[in-house]
Amino acid sequence: MSKIVSSSMKAVSDIPSGASILIGGFGICGMAHNLCKALSERKDVGDFHLVSNAGGIDGWGVGLMFKNRQIRSIIASRVGPACKAYEEQALKKEIEVELSPQGTFTERIRAGGAGIGGFFTPTGAGTVVAEGKETRIIEGLEYIFEKPIQANYAFIKAWKGDERGNLIYRMSAQNFNPIMATAAEVTIAEVEEIVPVGEIAPENVHTPGIFVQRVVLGEDIEKPIEIMTNRPRNNLGGI
């Protein structure tokens, strides 16, 4: 059965208010912009619970959802300055923000996808990260217990996909996408190219189609730079 959906809007058309959504991407690299944009254009929904490394940028990706105030809470490893709406809402406590150390963030999602009930880690022990969490001394070190993360939906950005949902990522866009694809009830993959079944060699598949329910060809392939800083050219020899 083909998993290809005709548009990003159709792919997100049944997502209800209050849904939890895993959104891939390290910053904006590997973020499913078209799916985020489509959901931001639905004025009838909101109060979403996001799990995302960062919050997109102004006018792009998850940033569009923050601009429209569709977010109720987010689990992230940082609050990025590239999205002013996210930053302002977090500072004013208009949204709930749970910051998780990046390695812990990743492992919690992996545990959710693997069906593991949680794990102990020394990361964050003795800090505000440990507040309200079970602690245990293991071989003389203090560990804290972290719960797994799962969600109703996952927005995944891949390079190529076939009609059965087998995916391959390109370079740094692989980041959180593969583990997020395993930890959601419904995984929606935005791809740059749809290829025939069999064109992606089995040994090259990064995410098997069993984890993917919908595949959509991204309408906008723009890849902006999250933060760019320039410095004046040196007049002494152009170095």
Image (cartoon, grey):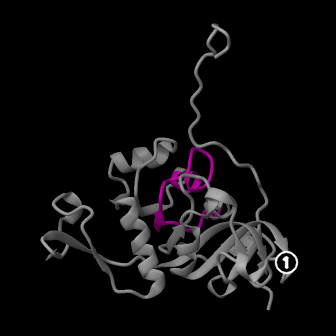
In the rendered image, the quadrant that contains the N terminus is bottom right
Residue, far top = 236
| Residue located 79% across and 78% down the image | 162
| Quadrant in the picture for residue 68 | bottom right
In the rendered image, the quadrant that contains the C terminus is top right
Range drawn in magenta: 41-66
Magenta stretch encompasses residue 63: yes
| Residue located 41% across and 49% down the image | 79
Q: Is residue 232 above or below residue 190?
A: above
Which residue is labeled 1 in the image? 199
Q: Is residue 166 visible?
A: no
Q: Is residue 46 visible?
A: yes
| Quadrant in the picture for residue 202 | bottom right
Q: Position of residue 91 (x, y in %)?
A: 34, 46
| Quadrant in the picture for residue 125 | bottom left
| Residue located 54% across and 56% down the image | 26
**In this picture, residue 111 sits left or right of residue 63:** left
Magenta stretch encompasses residue 58: yes
Q: Position of residue 133 (x, y in %)?
A: 20, 72
